[in-house]
Image (spheres, helix red, strand yellow):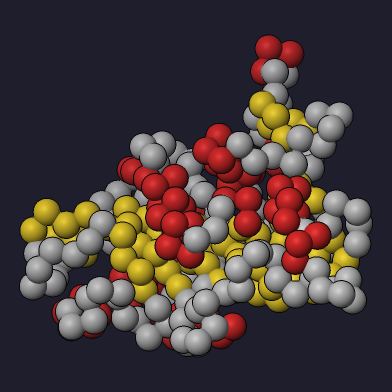
Amino acid sequence: MQFRFDSNNHVGQVLKIDNTLTVDGYENNHDLRNNLRLIINEIGKMSAIVQHLESPITSADKLLNSDHVIYMMTEQNTPANFAVIGFLKTGWKKLFIYNKQDICSETLVYCLLDFYVHESKQRQGYGKQLIEYMLQDIKLYAKNLVMEKPTTKLLQFMLKNFQLSKLINQENNFAIYEDFFDEFDENHDNTGNRTSGYNRPPTFGRHGAHKHHDSMGEILQNTGPSSSVMYNHNNDFVHNQINEMKPHTEEALGSLQINKYGDYVERDLKYHHSST
């Protein structure tokens, strides 16, 4: 996605944008900040289009009215040629979750809320680089991420890149890997209530000292109209339909299947034929 404006200087490969539309390390780059509203709105629309959503779940206004953070991967060969490869949005949420013993407790977790890589840049390792940058920044592991309504592509992505497969069923829209609970006992208080999903309490966001970031996710690896131009404003989001699949149907699993242990594994396509 190309955006043409003069940023006065080159920006980093991954930008960390807080809920004031300020880029970490580029607080004095006013041209970049002034253009971020347009950029965030456009990439949010692109993400919604490929996810078949009725409306974008990421926009500048939504970011301003939250404590979420956006990580945006960019390319910039010249000051006037600013391209976005992809982005992800994350945030802290308090959820009631079930552990491996089927015990429910209220827990503060870090959520992947939106995840998009431009079609022309998919399957080139950019998505993994973006996730790893975010994890290193917040000092967590991939198993610590909680995903809201994960798509099949996101599950495949996590299996391929982080060897995560077994999910613990929850009664909400969030998915949690069994590996998340490796530190479960260590994070209980004396009453048995779990106050945090991690050894370290959050140090930012509404739960920390600074009013900052947070968010959700989906990786998009479909082939589609690959374009380096901005979003077509003629698209009508109101008439788009949400294309949701139940998480354990054969249609949703695609090339994955669940073995007897509850793990997501690659389907043996030699004996499987799609009806499409």
Furthest residue toward top:
270
Quarter of the figure with residue 217:
bottom right
Q: Nearer the viewer, residue 107 or 49?
A: 107
Q: Residue at x 70, y 24 (%)?
A: 267
Q: Residue at x 81, y 29 (%)?
A: 259
Q: Nearer the viewer, residue 126 or 231?
A: 126
Quarter of the figure with residue 165:
top right
Q: Is residue 111 above or below residue 211?
A: above
**Residue 86 percent coordinates (x, y):** 37, 55
Please give left or right for residue 31 compared with residue 201 in the image: left
Q: Is residue 101 above or below residue 209?
A: above
Q: Residue at x 49, y 41 (%)?
A: 222
Q: Is the C terminus in the top left, top right, bottom left or bottom right quadrant?
A: top right
Q: Nearer the viewer, residue 264 or 57?
A: 264
Q: How many marks?
A: 0
Please give left or right for residue 15 compared with residue 198 in the image: left
**Residue 181 percent coordinates (x, y):** 75, 54
Please give left or right for residue 137 compared with residue 176 in the image: left
**Residue 1 percent coordinates (x, y):** 28, 56
Q: Residue at x 91, y 62 (%)?
A: 103
Let me know if residue 156 appears in the view. Answer: no
**Residue 195 percent coordinates (x, y):** 75, 75
Let me know if residue 30 appears in the view. Answer: yes
Q: Nearer the viewer, residue 117 or 169?
A: 169
